[in-house]
Image: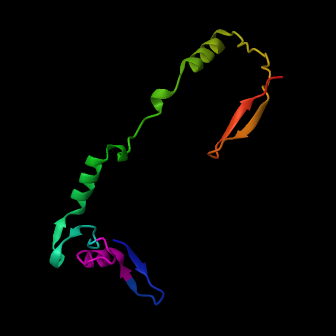
Amino acid sequence: MTQRRTNSGQMLDMDALMLQGEKEIALGNMKVNARGDKIGAGGKIVKKKEDVAREYYANNPKAVIKSVSIKDAVDNTSTVQDQSENIVGKKATTTKAKAKAKKTVEVELPNGDIELQEIEE
């Protein structure tokens, strides 16, 4: 129950107000009521909003959002190796070889994309 206080100090119950106008015809050219049901001649409900949504997702499988866990993508092998080396007392060695930085130039393609191209020296 959502109750709000107006500027004049009166309490206004928003949920009751929404339920009160649920069957009213919505403004516009979509021919739906305030709830979202499709209506036909005389204001009778032709298709409920749940049926419309179910039909949409059945016809558009790419619209369905999949939830994916990123926990499976984490690689724990390096963490386990670092911990085992610290326990044994070995020092972890790191290589300090510096890679040469490649020089690049930004080139704008005709469609507006920007592409990096390497420059040969």
Quadrant showing the C terminus: top right
Image quadrant assignment for residue 39? bottom left
Report the residue at 72% width, 39% height from top. Answer: 107
Quadrant showing the N terminus: bottom left
Indicate how the structure is coloured in the image: rainbow
Q: Is 110 located above or below residue 70 in the figure?
A: below
Farthest-out residue, right:
121
Find residue 25 and report its horizontal and vertical position in percent.
26, 77
Image quadrant assignment for residue 77? top right
Numbered label tally: 0
Q: Is residue 72 magenta?
A: no
Q: Is 62 located above or below residue 50 in the figure?
A: above
Left or right of 4 in this view: 121: right
Find residue 105 and report its horizontal and vertical position in percent.
77, 35
In this orientation, which residue lies closer to the viewer: 75 or 89? 75
Which residues make up the magenta segment?
Answer: 12-30
Q: Is residue 27 magenta?
A: yes
Left or right of 117 in this view: 52: left
Find residue 74 and report its horizontal and vertical position in percent.
51, 27
In this orientation, which residue lies closer to the viewer: 24 or 113? 113
Find residue 119 and report its horizontal and vertical position in percent.
78, 27
